[in-house]
Amino acid sequence: MAIGGLALGLRLWGLGQLHTLVFDEIYYVPFALDYLDHMPRFDAHPPLGKYLIALGIWLSRGPAVWLNWPTIAVQNQAISPLSFRWLNAALGATVPLVGAWLGWQLSAAYPRQRRVGFGLMVALLLSLEGLTLVESRLGLINLFGLWLGLLGQGCWLRGRRSPLDPRPSWLWTGAAGVCLGAAISVKWNFAGFWLAVVLLGMGRWQPQPGAESRVAQRRGYLVALGLVPLITYGLLWLPHLGLTQTSLLEVHQQLWHYHQSLEGGNAIHPYCSSWYTWPLLLRPVAYFYQGVGPWPPETILHPVVIPGTVYTLHALGNPVLWWLSTAAVLALLLGYGSKVMASWAQGYRSQNHRPQNHWLQGLRAQGMSPPVPSFILVNYAAHWLPWALVSRCTFFYHALGIGVFSTIALAWLLSRWWLDPRYRVWGWVVLGAIALSFWFWLPLYLGLPLSAEALQRRWLIPSWP
């Protein structure tokens, strides 16, 4: 409860302080209003994210009038920034809790104490993560895709039940398919959640109880992870298609041609960053910057506006957490890789040197099913490596997926330290460093006023401003 309260407070505090459209709000908020006016325009992404922003605006119309929320003009309409930000903030506050539930389901094969520690650590670290905090305080759509993807994977893990009962629960697995299809309906890049589940399902973590049952399970997974996401994705397009009188094929041809026509490099946008720079946090994105002179600007609502200060909002991860999380992914990769090689070698020797025996058999024989590291590593790769094929301008906020799963990797290692008295003190040291880092860079996440000198001290790397 305390972690949830902290996450909610951070997202609601001063939510309407930036009294203007910020960054890509200039696109998504008008698109959402177009749906409310029954006149949608072409957008470069599927429609679900704009539906949800429109839902938040529609639900808040009464409270906005009763509470006299300050408004701005968007498409000749008076609308409060709180109206198009509150739903994102509310869902964003639950991301640490959804992440904790995912960790609980992922560690089902472990003792209860280890599961509780892992889940609490995931929730705590995600509540101290900067990029998800910034994304959940604006009327943007990335947070919706992240939330649905995490929920879908949690449902999929819940449907796996336990190593002692390998029969899947098709209700939970079907719910996973719905959530994963909905995540793709926000942005195509959130297909990484679906891709990871498919790849992990192909690995067959748990032993199968018989030939006929294996066939039935494969058919079930084909429906739950193939047909259900596809149907969900298609159904979520229907309101848009009905208003625009276009076909699903036609609109996807437009989307494909649009994305293929985009170019890359800083000539397109000064905050473009390549996919291989994201794990090192080399180029965050400035969403907002406003200096305060003798007279306060109209774009800032604040009880006390101090002349000579700067308000800035940066899509910047918590640096200490981000770098330690990247190191945790590397540690898991090295450790898991060594176990895989050892298992393969053992299986190779025990089968009279016949290499056709798959190394996964060796892993199962050693009781390593389901392996938490493989879940984290496959998800990290599914959210990161496909960007190597993209030539268009990409941004650091595309690293939301790898940020979450690298944080889960660090939580997995820290939860082990907490259970071992020999390393517990180091766990507290790491947590303290992460918390101090979060506090130091918090003004950049919340848009708090800083002096020019204080802001300059927060640019550790020349490429950050």
Image (cartoon, rainbow, N blue to C red):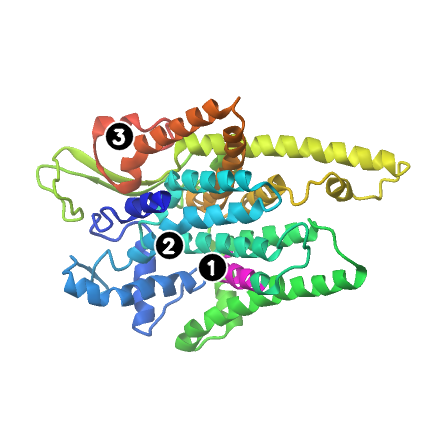
Give the CA distance from mark 1 to mark 2: 30 Å
Element under label 3?
helix
Q: Is residue 161 visible?
A: yes
Of 248 and 181, which appears nearest the observer?
181
Q: Amino acid at mark 1?
A: Tyr
Disc nearer the start of the sequence (1/2): 2
Can you name the residue that lies furthest to the front here? 112
Quadrant of the frame with the C terminus: top left
Instruction: Give the labeled residue for mark 2.
Output: 91
Which residue is label 1 attached to?
Answer: 258
In the depicted view, which residue is nearer to us: 167 or 35? 167
The extreme left residue here reads 294
Estimate the x, y position of residue 120 in percent, counting from the top left.
45, 41
For the residue pair 81 and 255, the one nearer the viewer reads as: 81
In terms of secondary structure, where does tag 2 sit? helix
Look at label 2 and name its amino acid: Leu
* 49 or 40, nearer to the observer: 49
Callouts 1 and 3 close, C-beta under 8 Å: no
Q: Which mark is residue 455?
A: 3
Q: Quadrant of residue 464?
A: top left
Is 289 covered by the magenta stretch? no
Magenta range is: 174-188
Q: Position of residue 375 (x, y in %)?
A: 60, 44
